[in-house]
Image (spheres, rainbow, N blue to C red):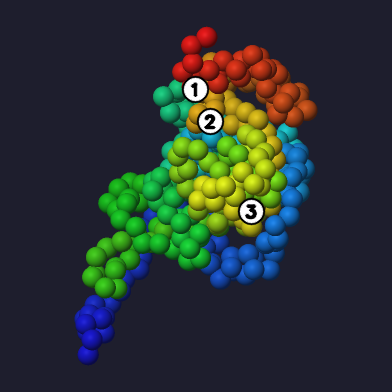
C-alpha cells in the first residue's frame, strides 16, 4: 500500500464553509472553458473601438466586472465614467483596493455587490461618504477577502481551475465574512482555505501602450492584471497610446496581455486620471479631495457629477473641466520630478 492510500484510509478529508460571504460568480472551470472555446474570438484582427461603443456592446446590466490596476493607480477611469453615463445597473465589482473605482460606480448607482479587500476609503486621502453609505445601507452587498485571496481567485481562473487552496485569512474575522471553504490537505492533513475561482463577465484594464490588435505592455506594478486578463470572459483595454505592432514584436517578453485575450482596445491618453499612472503622470490629489468634499452635501455632489460626468460628452470633456492639458502637464512633470 502506498503512503497516499494509507494516509487517506486513516484520515477523512473535511470540507466546511468558513465564512458567510456569497459567491457572486460561477467558479465552474468547465463552463468557463466552454465559453472561452466557443465564444472567445482568437484571430489577430484590429480591435480598435471607442469607449462609448464598448460600454454599450460589452457591458450589460447585471454583469460582474473586474477592474485592473490597484487603488487609484492605473485605474480605467474613462470606462468607469462611461458606465455611469450610460446608467448601467446591478453590476458586480471586484477590486483589490476598491477606492476611486468603487466611488465612481456607487455615485452612478451602478453596482449592488462587491468582492472586496479594502473599501470606503481612498487610502490616505480619507473616507468616501457615499461609499460608506452604500455599504451601511445594504445597497451594496459585500464579500470580504484579503488582497492576496482576491489575487489568487483570479489566479485559479487563469489556470482553468475552480478553486485554489490558501493559508491567508485563517483564524481572522475576514475569514468569517469571506466565501472561502475550510479544507484539509489530502497529503498532510494541514488546514487550508479553498477560495473559489473568479471569472468576471468583463475585465477592464488600462495599460501604458498597446497595438491595434490588443497586445499590451504595462510599466511598473501589474498586481493581478496578468491573471484578470486571462480570467475575464470579455476584456476591454484602454491604453495611453497606440504603438505599431513592430514595436511590440521587438521585445515580445514585455507583452503581458496578448491580443487573443482582448475584445476591444481604445486609445485614451490620461485614461487613468485622476489616479496615478506610473512614469506618466501623478495623481491629482486636489481633484480627489474635491470629490470627497463634494460628497458631504447631496446638492453639491449632484452638481459635481453633472459638471464632470453627466454634463460632458466623453472623457476628453471631463479632462477639460479639470484644467485640460495645462493641468495634466503639471501632473506629468510631478510624476517625473522635473523642475519647471
Which of marks 1 and 3 precedes in the sequence? 3
Q: Quadrant of residue 281?
A: top right
Q: Are marks 2 and 1 in contact (CB under 8 Å)?
A: yes
Whether residue 295 sits left or right of residue 263 in the image: it is: left
The residue that disc 2 covers is: 277
The residue that disc 1 covers is: 335
Of labels 3 and 2, the one closer to you: 3
Q: Is residue 97 above or below residue 322?
A: below
**Residue 122 image point, x, y percent:** 47, 28
**C-alpha distance separating marks 3 and 1:** 29 Å
Residue drawn at (70%, 19%) of the image: 320
**C-alpha distance separating marks 3 and 2:** 22 Å
Camera-side residue of 133 and 247 = 247
Helix, strand or loop at label 1? It is helix
Camera-side residue of 260 and 129 = 260
Residue 116's mark?
none
Q: Is residue 226 above or below residue 209?
A: below
Camera-side residue of 338 and 260 = 338
Residue drawn at (58%, 40%) of the image: 207
Helix, strand or loop at label 2? It is loop
Camera-side residue of 151 and 259 = 259
Amino acid at each position: 500500500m502506498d503512503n497516499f492510500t494509507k494516509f487517506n484510509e486513516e484520515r477523512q478529508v473535511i470540507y466546511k464553509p468558513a465564512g458567510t460571504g456569497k459567491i457572486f460568480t460561477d467558479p465552474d472551470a468547465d463552463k468557463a472553458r466552454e465559453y472561452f472555446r466557443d465564444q472567445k474570438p482568437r484571430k489577430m484582427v484590429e480591435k480598435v473601438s471607442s469607449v462609448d461603443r464598448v460600454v454599450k456592446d460589452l457591458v450589460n446590466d447585471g454583469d460582474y466586472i473586474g477592474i485592473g490596476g490597484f487603488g487609484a493607480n492605473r485605474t480605467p477611469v474613462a470606462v468607469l465614467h462611461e458606465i455611469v453615463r450610460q446608467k448601467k445597473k446591478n453590476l458586480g465589482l471586484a477590486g483589490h483596493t476598491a477606492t476611486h473605482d468603487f466611488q465612481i460606480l456607487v455615485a452612478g448607482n451602478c453596482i449592488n455587490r462587491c468582492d472586496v479587500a479594502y473599501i470606503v476609503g481612498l487610502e490616505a486621502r480619507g473616507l468616501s461618504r457615499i461609499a460608506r453609505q452604500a455599504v451601511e445601507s445594504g445597497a451594496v452587498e459585500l464579500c470580504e477577502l484579503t488582497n492576496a485571496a482576491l489575487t489568487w481567485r483570479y489566479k485559479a481562473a487563469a489556470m482553468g481551475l475552480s478553486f485554489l487552496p490558501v493559508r491567508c485569512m485563517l483564524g481572522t474575522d475576514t475569514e468569517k465574512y469571506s466565501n472561502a471553504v475550510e479544507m484539509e490537505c489530502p497529503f498532510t492533513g494541514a488546514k487550508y482555505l479553498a477560495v473559489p475561482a473568479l471569472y468576471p463577465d468583463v475585465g477592464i484594464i488600462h495599460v501604458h501602450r498597446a497595438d491595434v490588435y490588443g497586445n499590451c505592455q504595462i510599466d511598473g506594478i501589474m498586481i493581478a492584471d496578468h491573471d484578470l486578463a486571462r480570467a475575464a470572459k470579455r476584456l476591454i483595454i484602454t491604453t495611453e497610446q497606440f504603438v505599431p505592432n513592430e514595436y511590440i514584436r521587438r521585445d515580445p517578453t514585455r507583452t503581458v496581455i496578448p491580443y487573443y485575450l482582448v475584445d476591444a482596445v481604445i486609445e485614451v491618453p490620461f485614461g487613468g486620471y485622476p489616479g496615478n499612472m506610473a512614469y506618466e503622470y501623478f495623481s491629482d490629489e486636489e481633484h480627489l479631495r474635491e470629490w470627497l468634499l463634494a460628497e458631504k452635501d447631496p446638492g453639491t455632489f449632484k452638481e459635481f457629477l453633472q459638471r464632470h460626468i453627466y454634463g460632458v460628452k466623453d472623457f476628453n470633456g471631463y479632462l477639460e473641466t479639470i484644467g485640460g492639458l495645462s493641468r495634466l502637464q503639471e501632473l506629468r512633470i510631478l510624476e517625473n520630478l522635473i523642475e519647471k
